[in-house]
Amino acid sequence: MIYREAGVFKTSYDADMALLPIPMDKYFVIAVTLFAVIVVPFISNEYWLGSILVPVLILSIAAIGLNILTGYAGQVSLGTGAFMAAGAYMGYKFVTAFPDVNIIFGILAGGVSSAMIGIVFGAPSLRIKGFYLAVTTLAAQFFLIWLFQKQPWFVNYSISGVPTAPPREIFGILVTGAEASATARYVFVVCFTIALAWIARNLVRGRVGRTWMAIRDMDIAAELIGIRPLQTKLSAFAISSFYCGVAGALWAFCYINTVEPSAFDINRSFQILFMVIVGGLGSILGSFLGAAFIFTLPIFLNNFFGVLGLDVSTATIRHIEFMVFGGLIVFFLIVEPHGLARLWALAKEKLRMWPFPY
Amino acid sequence: MEFLQSIFVTPFVEIVDSPYFFFEVFFGGLMAGVMYSLVALGFVLIFKASGVFNFSQGVMVLFAALNFVGLLEHGVPIWLAFLITMAIMTALAFAVERLVLRHLVNQEPIILFMATIGLAFFLEGFGETLWGSEIKPLEVGIPNDVWFMGDAMIQQADVFAAVVAGAMVTVLALFFHYTRVGRALRAVADDHQAALSIGIPLNHIWIIVWAVAGVVALVAGILWGSKLGVQFSLSVIALKALPVLILGGFTSIPGAIIGGLIIGAGEKVAEVYWGSVFGGAIEEWFAYIVALVFLFFRPQGLFGDKIIERV
């Protein structure tokens, strides 16, 4: 009774093809979006904006990227961290080479370079799949991180090897670098997130997304009905890497404020894979839920032991974190393979029925 | 030009100049390869019997070694610690079958693969919660002297590791060929459905292969651990077993051994002679790139079964 899908009569194709054809969904999403952009910056403090919301949103972008590749196109990748690094380093190169160009283009340039690298490392997917492919993405992970670490050209021959993110402004407000206020960085990141999520949502329900899903479900059958595996798989790799690249650039510019390889190591790849699994494979909403869940879980665990009054060393907390993550992954794969996004769908179902049992 | 020369000419000149040094590097690499082979062996066992690509094999090596070294530190004699750790690995096999595999029957291989990633994280956290994460030296009486062959130096520990690995492969081969369980394992590896229909209990077979893989992991863990100390990075090094598998083929035990040797020797030689051209530390990715290139030409690996797909 609360959530109603019935009674929506469409009179035009446009209405039928709308992103959110149900009015309740539409108003809800618009309300959440406006809330995130306008209200949140006023009601949150520096810590929440800068240390929780910004990284969660950036990781959501990366998770959407991996979800496109793994959840929609069915190609497992363990190299997400490397593609993020590609975005961060190439974004940094672009921003320092063209200091007058708007920072938005710098970040998009990072994404585009990452997409090109993604195509190169995605090429083997035409011959192999499954865990074979996972190994080639591991190649990307180790090779790219090594490349950025060892070749001083990527950091403009900086002595420390870990350059700081250059400060850049939009409309006269500093949005990147250490001096930028948390609010400005948050608004900058949230706008990126909304735009990219909107594009992703449209991509996956359109022609491109349907070909991805056909390839995922059975690539030979998809090929037989006329879907070209070359374009489909490589476009999935390119777009996925683009998202990861943008996320990496934002991570470097708006969150950690330095461009450093350790932020994009193999654990980052696993972290994002976990977000996608826990959030829900093949769901844009799931990417957000998964990112929020996986990122805040360690913070929660930290405080949890504090509240209990147990004196647990940080090392032990880290180990317990590992155990909880591992256990959760197995749990989700067994009990709820569609992840948190599925729980959301179930909640909607319940709201539709309520107060009747069926 | 200078760059090309440093890739195509200088290293070979160096090799010809000091063949003993080359031999030393090559031999050291082979021995590191033996270690990769041992990890890869565990992968192959499980993959053949259950079609599960066990990502956690590397962490199982760490987990077994952590338990072993932890028990030793509590004053347990070596032989008893070995037996207890074997028991732990068997218990682990039971738990994995009961809690994970059983619930994921008939799922796509990639789901199982991701489940083993979860398992890897769990085991890593569990092992380190129990025993702590500091680097632990492991001393089990493996000789650590050197022999000289001409001018080349050979670590006795490496030779010892190779002998142990060889012995283990022999034992496994005998086990597979001459025991009832071994025959059942081969039957399952050949065809799950057929094996099931003649009354081979798949669940038991899974427990057995996971337990065997656990023991292989334990041996690998002891050998690695006595060389480098038991530490977290063992599980990262063990990831190198993945390219080894791609090279050797996922379904072939000889493939795992030979793949390991090629990767081990190849990356050491590449690091010593070509590393400086690229800025060093190419060991980190050499194996993966070799595997990547190899996949383009022969996706099933050197000895693997040909991949046939049907709609």
Image: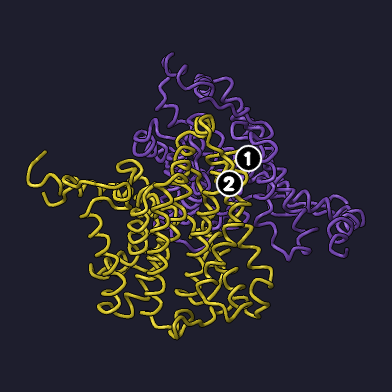
Chain colours: A yellow, B purple
**Would you name the residue on which mark 2 appears?**
A135
Output the chain of dot 1.
Answer: B
**Figure quadrant of residue A152:** bottom right
Residue drawn at 67 percent across, 50 percent down? B289
Question: Seen from this angle, which residue lies furthest front?
Answer: A11
Q: Position of residue A23 (x, y in %)?
A: 22, 54
**Figure quadrant of residue A261:** bottom right
Are the residues under marks 2 and 1 on the same chain?
no
Left or right of residue B63: residue A9? left
Q: Closest to the observer: B56 or A96? A: A96
For badge 2, the amino acid type reads Val
The answer to whether A34 is drawn above or below residue A167 in the figure is above
Please identify the quadrant where the C terminus of chain A is shown: top left
Left or right of residue B103: residue A240? right
Pointer 2 with pointer 1, Cβ within 8 A: yes
Q: Closest to the observer: B167 or A128? A: A128
Output the chain of dot 2.
Answer: A
Q: Secondary structure at mark 1?
A: helix
The answer to whether residue B47 shows anywhere in this view is: no
Q: Position of residue A168 (x, y in %)?
A: 50, 81
What is the distance, in whole Å, between disc 2 and disc 1 at their CAs? 8 Å
Q: Closest to the observer: B278 or B100? A: B278
Residue drawn at 50 percent across, 53 percent down? B69
For label 2, the crowd category at 10 Å Cα-Cα, with few meaning under 14, some 14 to 19 and many 20 or more, is many
Q: Secondary structure at mark 2?
A: helix
Q: Disc number at residue B246?
A: 1
